[in-house]
Structure formats: structure tokens, C-alpha cells
Amino acid sequence: MGRWLRFSLIVLAGLLVDQVTKLYIHGSMSLHQSIPVLEGLFNITYLRNKGAAFSFLSQVSWRIPFFSAVTLVAAVVILVALRRLREDQRLAQTALAMIFSGAVGNLIDRVRLGEVIDFLDVYWRNHHWPAFNVADSLICVGVALVALDMLREERQQARGRA
């Protein structure tokens, strides 16, 4: 499978799961409603976030154009990076597709709703991690996989010099 087909399939799958879960949460729960899944660790909680991670820039009037521009620049950077990868760098290709998919998934929410639907609520006792969604998860896992791929590439290059 070529890099562009792999990329497209991962992006489409990520967008589908992200958007379907958000539509389900929006259609089946009331805002701020919470459903315990693992008592003391994890709830499904319907929230809306006008900003980025940790509600960053949630109060500024120019947030949607700003986040849209940042997402579009990131998308171009990802596509250029994908083009520069070797065909055998499948982990990096997968990672970039995940990041792209997550960024576009949250952009769809911002354009459609003016804010992002979050619903994954991880916590320990009274300490809650900020709620997130599938798109956020795709971005985080994608970034971790890019870092892993970079470390792997560095090791392979070091072995080649030895």
C-alpha cells in the first residue's frame, strides 16, 4: 500500500470515528451530563471547549480564524513532510495521518459549532484531566509516534556510522 493511500484511509477512518462519536454524544446527552464508565477513573461527560488544549484562547473573539489558520498551516506542513518521507517510513506516515485527521476533526467542530465537543473525562479522585475527544487522542498518539519514529531513525543512522 502506498503512502498516499495509507494516509487517506487513516485520515478518513479517524475523521469518521471522531465525528460519529461527537454526533452521538451531542444527540444522546445533555451538556454537562456525565456517565460513569470506570468509577473513580473515567466518565463520558459532554462538554464544549471554545479554546484549544486546557481552554487556551477560549475568551478571544478571533479564536476561530486563528485556529483555522493554524490548522491549515499544520495541514500543509504535514502534507509536505509526508511527501518527503521514504516509502519504508510507515510509522511516520501513520503518525502524520493521525495528526492530520485529529486537527481536521477539531476544525470541523470549530467551523460548524464555534467550539469543540469533548467527552472523554479521565480523573483520579477529585483531580480531572481536561476533557478531550477522539481527535485530541489522534493528535497526541500521532505526536508520540513521530517522536518514536525519530528515535528509531536516529538509532538506525548511528548504527550505520559505527
Image (cartoon, helix red, strand yellow):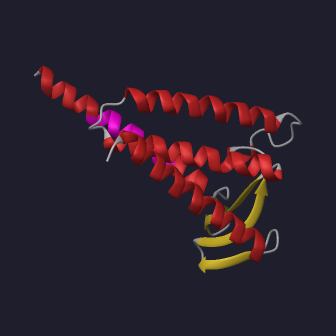
Residue 144 within the magenta-colored segment of the rendering? yes
Q: At which x and y percent is residue 34?
A: 73, 75
Residue at (80, 69) in percent of width and height: 32
Side of 70 relative to 144 (left or right): right
Residue at (65, 60) in percent of width and height: 19
Residue 48 within the magenta-colored segment of the rendering? no
Instruction: Give the residue at the far right of this rendering.
Output: 61
Instruction: Give the residue at the far top of this rendering.
Output: 161
Q: Quadrant of residue 154?
A: top left
Q: Does residue 82 appear in the picture of this structure? A: yes
Side of 67 relative to 74 (left or right): right
Q: Would you place residue 50 above or below residue 39 in this image?
A: above
Q: Quadrant of residue 27?
A: bottom right
Side of 18 relative to 34 (left or right): left
Q: Would you place residue 112 above or below residue 34 in this image?
A: above
Q: At which x and y percent is residue 160?
A: 13, 24
Q: Would you place residue 53 above or below residue 85 in this image?
A: below
Q: At which x and y percent is residue 52?
A: 71, 43
Q: At which x and y percent is residue 118?
A: 70, 59
**Magenta region:** 140-152
For the C terminus, which image quadrant?
top left
